[in-house]
Amino acid sequence: MSEARYLVERHTILSVVVGSRAFGLSTAASDVDRRGVYVAPTADFWRMAKPAPHVEGPLPEQFSWEVERFCELALSANPNILEALHSPLVEQRCALGAELQDLAPAFLSRRAHTTFARYAGTQFTKAENRREREGEPRWKQIMHMLRLMISGALLLESGAVHIDASPYRERLLAVRRGELSWDEVSTWRGELSARLDRALATSPLPEHPDTTRVENWLISIRRRSLTNGSSLA
């Protein structure tokens, strides 16, 4: 067994399903996209070769992060990380995974405005470039961009991560099928961009995440790993 596979199979503390199935946008053709968090043994960091910060596989459409890397990305309000942390479709969770989910509010801050808007802007630019080259964009990509903007706006407005996009399901799936014109999609994107900006001004989220709380938890994880070793997860 490779070291990377060993980390995922023996040290995973949380594994969830993300993507369309978690967002309420799945169809018969939807993949099962899995994301996970593993805790590499503390003693492994003493070697010259450090544990992998992330691992792809071993299952198809599966990707996992070492807990420290996961926390770094979550503190920066990475949309994919935050949505994985809040997925309702949990396939595997131990006591440490539950601790990580309980820690979720500490990761949230107004940084989400920048990261969600930037990610959506990047995806829109890619879609525009593809449309210019090939005549039309990847409509699935556009659908997920719009869904992400909705999620970002709801996060900033409410102070909580909202995964369920089923209230927007029919219109989003119409985008995926290419039934909305490019002008209609661009208008919707503009409306959501303005909504993100308005939400930032009155958001209940703090300016910065609670990095100290997260760091203290990480330190406790490393210490417990030294005590409990391979039984940690």
Image (tube, grey):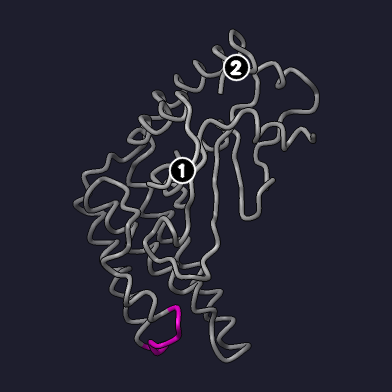
Circle 2 — which element? helix
Residue flagged by tag 2: what amino acid is it?
A: Ser
Q: Residue at x 79, y 35 (%)?
A: 2
The number of numbered badges drawn on the structure is 2
The residue stretch that appears in magenta? 176-183
Residue flagged by tag 1: what amino acid is it?
A: Ser
- In the image, is residue 132 part of the stretch drawn in magenta? no
What percent of the width, then of the height, locates residue 185?
Answer: 38, 81
Residue highlighted by disc 2:
231
What percent of the width, then of the height, locates residue 134?
Answer: 62, 89
Instruction: Report if the CB atoms under discs 2 and 1 are less than 8 Å apart.
Output: no
Circle 1 — which element? loop
Work out which residue is located at the far top of the displayed protein and give it.
227
Q: Residue at x 29, y 69 (%)?
A: 168
Q: Considering depth in this image, is 191 or 70 the residue closer to the camera?
A: 70
What percent of the width, then of the height, locates residue 117?
Answer: 40, 61
Q: Considering depth in this image, is 196 or 24 the residue closer to the camera?
A: 24
Please give left or right for residue 183 compared with residue 228 in the image.
left
Instruction: Give the mark toward the camera: 2 or 1.
Output: 2
Q: Which mark is residue 76?
A: 1
Examine the rendered structure and indicate whether residue 98 appears above or below residue 164: above
Instruction: Find residue 69 and report its image quarter.
Output: top right
What percent of the width, then of the height, locates residue 140?
Answer: 50, 74
Please give left or right for residue 162 compared with residue 116 in the image.
left
Examine the rendered structure and indicate whether residue 162 appears above or below residue 122: above
Please state, as top left, top right, bottom left or bottom right, where the N terminus lies in the image: top right
